[in-house]
Amino acid sequence: MKPQKEKDNTKKLIAIFSISIIVLIGLVVAGTYAFFTNSVIDRRGDNTTNLITGSVSEFGLKDGTITGDNLIPGDTVTKNFSLSNRSTGPVNFKLLWKDITNSFVNKQDLIITLTQDGKTLISEADNNTFPSTASSSVLKDNLTIPTGATQNFTLKITYRNTEQDQSGDMGKTISASIAIEAR
């Protein structure tokens, strides 16, 4: 039979070992949770995504997601979004399509137009079409926003009525996120 002192030491070692295991498990769980839930925190509460690049500290796009479901020929999907430059200098940038979904068969029937504060950047005559399914594509390049400015954009996607049989596109869906890339 073990003396009382050895029993007490054994109990203390088991308790310390058990607590150490519990603390270790807690640290692993907390670290894993932090890793998988890391996200951008919206400081202003207005769904603005900020970029931080070089001297650009406050350059953001507000609400850049566009979706169209069950479109019929002649329909237009309109998306208004704004871009703000609260940095210390003008920013050259491009607008990108991200996370594109386009289940249309006749992709050439989806014509896009883009205006910035009433100025036409992409007209219907340019015959630009909504991109095919891809992870990323350039919407408009070589743009500049001055310091302290907010630019308002209107993007329209028109499902052109071709007077041809377009039944293959019934119930089809388009969607994309609009993103910015500073240069």
Image (cartoon, rainbow, N blue to C red):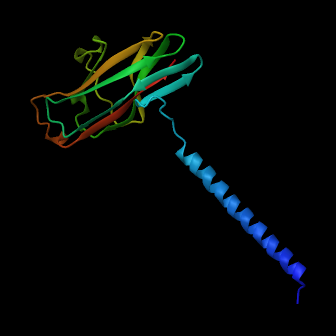
Q: Residue 30 at x, y = what percent?
A: 61, 52
Query: In which quadrant of the rendered image does the N terminus lie?
Result: bottom right
177 relative to 12, above or below: above
Considering depth in this image, is 52 or 10 the residue closer to the camera?
10
Position of 29 with respect to 182 (left or right) is right
68 relative to 120, above or below: below
Position of 41 with respect to 35 (left or right) is left
Instruction: Using the rendered view, name the quadrant where residue 75 is placed.
Output: top left
Considering depth in this image, is 82 or 107 the residue closer to the camera?
82
Q: Residue furthest left?
A: 163
Instruction: Using the rendered view, name the quadrant where residue 14 is placed.
Output: bottom right
Considering depth in this image, is 52 or 142 the residue closer to the camera?
52
Considering depth in this image, is 94 or 33 the residue closer to the camera?
33
Q: Residue 112 at x, y = what percent?
A: 26, 23
Number of disc labels: 0
Instruction: Using the rendered view, name the quadrant where residue 150 is placed.
Output: top left
Q: Residue at x 37, y 32 (%)?
A: 177
Q: Residue 127 at x, y = what percent?
A: 25, 20
Q: Residue at x 18, y 36 (%)?
A: 71
86 relative to 36, above or below: above
Q: Residue 139 at x, y = what percent?
A: 37, 23
Q: Residue at x 50, y 35 (%)?
A: 41
Position of 158 with respect to 181 (left or right) is left
